[in-house]
């Protein structure tokens, strides 16, 4: 795990991740289906958070399979276990753990979404996970391509959102989040003995109108703790209401914001 998690750990942040999970569900499910995850499989979900990815897998493996989610945050684990209990899903469970020291398994599939970007040693984590796969098993990840040089992809341009992008890059750097994890993933998987399975799918999120203001304000709120703790921005600079109003004025009624891409990659163990 990165030396410090970049995002807040509270209900607002969990709500942000839940909304993000819904937006990313189609690309995530498409990846898992392409990887052949189906009924009866035993699957490990890395960095399971609130359980969104585990629930996608649970539908695919059906009650004849098994899903284990691991997350380093005990609050996430407790909430996710309550969630599946309320849904009556007995084949899904969650445990506190670190993906760099994965459960024994063995597993037919190991999956994750936006989790490898927070691992300082990508190959070491993948090697540990690969050791828990059965022969013929698969690993499938949807990962964000963090690039400090990418700039803000939007119209019209907003100086405030460009500042947020710079703050985000600085916050990621301060917490040890490496760049270009997604595009490194195929070669990293091959280096630990797995066989990548192209073609790979690229997907992204697009926000329009008032959703742009809501999205960037939520990002700023989630990052504010790391930004102030590392001296990147002051509390006055991070006033959410003032920031949101500046974005509204700069963007007008119809802005379009395109978020940097996510790459879907899967590989098979010989």
Image: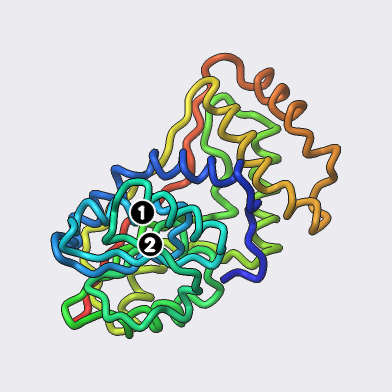
Q: How many marks?
A: 2
Give x and y (percent) for residue 135.
18, 83
Residue beneath the point at 80% across and 57% down: 229
The numbered disc on residue 34 is none
Tell me if 231 is positioned left or right of 181 in this view. right
Foreground of the two, 190 or 268: 268
Residue occupying the point 43% across, 33% down: 206
Q: Determine the residue positioned at 56% across, 34% down.
A: 215
| Relative image position of residue 142 (x, y in whole percent) | 37, 57
Q: Looking at the image, which residue is at 43% across and 57% down?
A: 81
What is the x, y in percent for residue 236?
A: 86, 37
In this rendering, which labeled residue sits more in front, label 2 or label 1? 1
Q: Is residue 168 left or right of residue 129?
A: right
> Is residue 263 depicted above or below 103 in this figure?
above
Specify which label sits upstream in the sequence, 2 or 1.
Answer: 1
Residue 169 at what x, y percent from top left? 65, 53
Name the residue beneath numbered marker 1. 53
Neighbours of disc 1 within 10 Å: few (<14), some (14-19), many (20+) = many
Front residue of 189 and 220 = 220
| In the rendered image, the vertical position of residue 50 relative to residue 105, given as above or below | above
- Disc 1 on helix, strand or loop? helix
Contact between marks 2 and 1 (CB within 8 A): the answer is yes
Q: Which mark is residue 112?
A: 2
């Amino acid at each position: 795990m990165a030396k410090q998690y970049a995002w807040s750990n509270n209900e607002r942040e969990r709500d942000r991740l839940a909304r993000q999970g819904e937006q990313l569900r189609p690309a995530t499910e498409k990846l898992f289906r392409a990887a052949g995850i189906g009924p009866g499989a035993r699957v490990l979900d890395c960095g399971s958070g609130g359980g969104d990815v585990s629930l996608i897998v649970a539908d695919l493996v059906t009650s004849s399979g098994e899903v284990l989610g691991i997350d380093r945050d005990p609050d996430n684990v407790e909430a996710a276990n309550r969630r599946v209990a309320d849904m009556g899903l007995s084949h899904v469970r969650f445990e506190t753990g670190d993906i760099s020291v994965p459960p024994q398994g063995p597993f037919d599939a190991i999956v994750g979404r936006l989790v490898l970007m927070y691992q300082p040693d990508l190959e070491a984590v993948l090697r540990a996970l690969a050791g828990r796969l059965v022969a013929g098993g698969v690993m499938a990840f949807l990962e964000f391509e963090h690039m400090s040089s990418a700039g803000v992809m939007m119209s019209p341009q907003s100086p405030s959102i460009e500042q947020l992008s710079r703050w985000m890059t600085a916050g990621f750097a301060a917490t040890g989040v490496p760049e270009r994890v997604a595009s490194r993933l195929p070669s990293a998987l091959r280096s630990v003995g797995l066989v990548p399975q192209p073609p790979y799918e690229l997907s992204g999120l697009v926000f329009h109108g008032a959703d742009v203001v809501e999205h960037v304000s939520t990002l700023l709120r989630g990052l504010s703790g790391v930004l102030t703790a590392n001296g990147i921005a002051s509390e006055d600079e991070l006033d959410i209401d003032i920031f949101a109003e500046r974005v509204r004025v700069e963007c007008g009624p119809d802005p379009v914001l395109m978020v940097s891409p996510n790459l879907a990659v899967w590989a098979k163990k010989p």
